[in-house]
Image (tube, coloured by chain):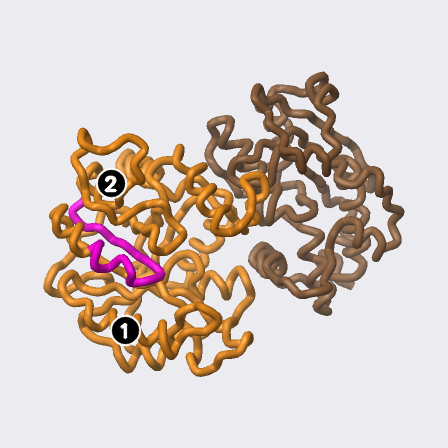
Chain colours: A orange, B brown
Amino acid sequence: MILTFKENAVIFPLMLPIFRSNYSLTSILTLDEAVEKESRLPNRSDSIFDICKDYNLEDVFIVDNTLTGLVEAYENAKKANLNLRFGYRVNVCQDINNKTPESKLTESKFIIFATKTSFADLIKLHNISSTEGIYEGSSRLDFKTMKEHWGKNLSLAVPFYDSYVYYNLLYGRQCVPELDFTDPCYFIEDNGLPFDGLLINHLKETIKEHEILPSKTIYYRDKKDFKAYMTYRCILNRSTFQKPELRHFGSQEFCMESWKESMEENNAK
Amino acid sequence: MQSNLLRFNKKQKYIVFDTETESLALALARPFQLSWLVYEDHKISKNEDHMIYWKDLNVSADAARITRFDYNLWKEKAKDPREVLELFESYLYNPEYLIIGANLFGYDVYVINTLRKMLGLKSDFSYLDRVLDIQCIQKGIYLGLKSIPENRTAWQYQMYHYVKRGVKTSVKHLCGLYEIPYDESMAHDAQMDNLYCLQIFQKQLMVIDV
């Protein structure tokens, strides 16, 4: 398994739930302190840590577009006795000094995970991305910078959506990753989107089996929460519920309920 | 001469389909109309137009205006969704048929998926590799392509995501481009759109190798 850390080897379930918090502005899940089920206020926003406790998870994978929630995540994961695996989801381009619209065509997402105990290397890369790397409000890194600051406390993953594979296959871009400094793992997901199968087949054809990790991005707890999630996304997008104008926003499966169903299905097999 | 090209393949069967929905929310919008035509042996052999019944149908004001939704007509004609879907899927999942339409990758494939989900069925996009979207093909033509690349579905996604100012691919625009008479008063009528799509597709086959 690629995504393991020497000090604290992680045993993954069949499918890794990867939570996104509200700090990413693409999720309605919070990093609030876990509360016993009976003591939770009705209609309270769902906390990632509550969900982990309810599902008896020992490790919590949180991947955000920012490190704003890192301290809160660290403290509340500790209180909930959960092993925090925090990842920074960032655009990586060919050259952060190239601040032209054309350079955006070389961008794709990567996830940089930190070990449980040491976030220094991750924070360093984050700081570079959001200072000298920033372009049009978006934090960016390039492969040269990543290589220069890469350390044993970091681990790299290629997300299923918005990765270089995704953009090259479905957008016709020509993102060229330079990953000679580490061996990344590749997440695959199946959320019932029409192109999921196309992308899965492509990854299985081009990536070694042991580098592929089934996962599911979690933006909300249950399928019934999709409307609340969509409302939130529409507000941020300044669009309406009837006309969300959110491309490929056609699945209600980005939730723990769906993760549970998939796990049960796998177990039944 | 490449006899395997669709323009020469007179035996190829097609369905052209379109949906009208209560809103534009991809994961939630239920179709109230599903229309398709079957084209085989050089002619339209079937022209199916079905209203779909939902107890609590809630057509948004915008959708009603654009599609000229007539509640009384819908109520009079609406059928059980399962009955309509089963009939439609007898063509959709039949590998003999190529599936033609406009903006299928960005919209209608989601609508069919939503319909399946509403009826308790699982997502099944196995028909996707038989889909030919006239808007994606047209972008390829605009880019000067002589033929559609091998990985047709991925390529169509690339074309779907290709956005450039001034590149117009609406059914109305394409009708004008290919000199197909277009009746403005019938815009967004699912049945008419299917007829337009079929004619546009036939014209495109003469321009690009598929």
On screen, A150 above or below B187? below
Task: Name the side, left or right, on which B15 lies relative to B56.
Answer: right
Q: Amino acid at mark 2?
A: Ile
- What's the distance in space between the residues labelled 1 and 2, CA to CA? 32 Å
Q: Which mark is residue A256?
A: none
Whole-percent x and y of residue A108? 44, 67
Q: Amino acid at mark 1?
A: Thr
**The magenta segment:** A57-73
The residue tagged 1 is A182
Q: Residues within 10 Å of mark 2 (few under 14, many from 20)?
A: some
Q: Residue at x 39, y 36 (%)?
A: A225
The residue tagged 2 is A51
* Quadrant including the C terminus of chain B: bottom right
Whole-percent x and y of residue B56? 56, 22
Whole-percent x and y of residue A135? 46, 73
Task: Name the side, left or right, on which A205 lies relative to B57.
Answer: left
Q: Please name whichever residue, A175 or A114, is drawn nearer the observer in this view of the structure.
A: A114
Q: Residue at x 60, y 49 (%)?
A: B105
Q: Chain of mark 2?
A: A
| Mark sitting earlier along the chain (1/2) | 2
- Mark 1 vs 2: CB contact within 8 A: no
Q: Secondary structure at mark 2?
A: helix
On screen, A264 above or below A10? above
Whole-percent x and y of residue A95? 43, 80
Q: Quadrant of residue A156?
A: bottom left
Q: Please name whichever residue, A176 or B11, is drawn nearer the observer in this view of the structure.
A: A176
Q: Quadrant of residue A232?
A: top left
Magenta stretch holds residue A135? no
Task: Name the side, left or right, on which A82 lies relative to A213.
Answer: left
Q: Residue at x 78, y 47 (%)?
A: B10
